[in-house]
Structures are given as structure tokens and as C-alpha cells.
Amino acid sequence: MAASRLRVTGGTARGIPLAEPRGVRLRPTSALVREALFNILGDKVDDARVLDLYAGTGALAIESLSRGAASAVLVEAESNAIQAILQSLARTGFSDQATVLRGRLPGALRSVEGTFDLIVMDPPYRDETAEATLTEAGSVLAEGGTVVYEHGSRYNPPERPGTLYLVDRRVYGDSALALYAKQERE
């Protein structure tokens, strides 16, 4: 197996290589975009309960745990990807702080319990379930929480999906991050 090109970029597990699944085509969030994301989030990650949708390699959840998140739930459909996530959680020492759920989105959100301070989602670009998943994510977002939706830079994300509203959008080459907050009840 070749050396992993994917590593944790910051926090207590900085530099630890993450396992990459065999036979699964993924487009992991680049180190540059992950670093930018966590600079934007700052102390919102501290003690956060994190939900990683379309987890892939688990890099976003593991990065969150490395930077001080209290716990993470990762949702992934592919069994090879889940095995790689479990391997990476063991390598980084975060196995006890994380739960991995197998399921397809948005339906898998029904098996998620509680609310989350930070929801990260990095679906395959042009995935037909992404907007429905984004809309449903609002139902498990805690008050004051943030949803981060990584998408292709040429795509215009919805401004008001369900109970969420677009707060910020940043472009990094072919990738972009859309940040959402929950609308206050009136």
C-alpha cells in the first residue's frame, strides 16, 4: 500500500496519515480547504458535537476531533470507506469519541440521534441527494450551530434550504464552502 497523501492538518493528531479506502472513488477535502475551514470556524469546534455527512475518508470529522471537538458521528454508505474511517480513528486515537453509521443520505439522517453544533457535508459534486440532505440537516442542527457544505465552485448553493440560511461562501479553486446557520423561530 502506498503512503497516504491525506494527513490531519492541525490539532493533537496533526501529521497523522489517514487511511484511504480501496476501490472507492473519493474526492477528499484538500488540506488547503480543511485548513481554511478550521480557520473560519475557530473556537466553534471546541467541545462541539460534530456530524460528518458523506464522510468518505472521515477527514473532516477527524480534523474536528483533533482540534477539540467533543464527539463525532460519521455517516457513510460505502463499506470500504467505513473500514478506512475506522482504521483512521484507531490511528488517531479518536475511536472512543466517534460513531460511524452506514447509510445512504438523506434517509440515514433518521438514524441520527440528538443535535449537533457542527455539521460538515462533502457530497460528491453534482450528487442528486445533496440539497435534500442539506435541507434535512437543519432538523438536527443545534441552535447557534453551523452547517458547512463543500461543493463545486461553479455551483450556486441554495440560500434558504429548509430552516437554514446561507451566512458565508468561500471559493478555493474548484471547491467552495457554503456556511449555513439555523433561522431563529419567530
Image: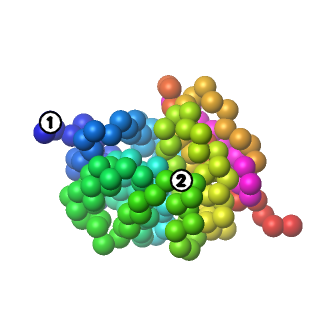
Query: Which quadrant is home to the N terminus?
Result: top left
* Disc number placed over residue 2 in the picture, else none: 1
Extreme left residue here? 1
Distance in Å between CA atoms under marks 1 and 2: 31 Å
What type is the residue that disc 2 sits on?
Leu
**Where are the magenta residues, as a range?**
161-172
Per the picture, the main secondary structure of the magenta-coloured stretch is strand
Q: Secondary structure at mark 2?
A: loop
Extreme right residue here? 186
What's the residue at 52%, 49% (across, down)?
121
In this view, 135 is above or below 176: below
Dot 2 corresponds to which residue?
105
**Residue density around tag 1, few if under 14, some if 14–19, many if 20 or more, within 10 Å:** few
Residue 45 seen = no
Q: Position of residue 128 (x, y in %)?
A: 59, 39
Q: Is residue 124 left or right of residue 66?
A: right
In front: mark 1 or mark 2? 2
In this view, 153 is above or below 164: above
Quadrant in the rendering for residue 119? bottom right
Q: Is residue 28 left or right of residue 138?
A: left
Query: Which quadrant is home to the C terminus?
Result: bottom right
* Disc number placed over residue 57 in the picture, else none: none
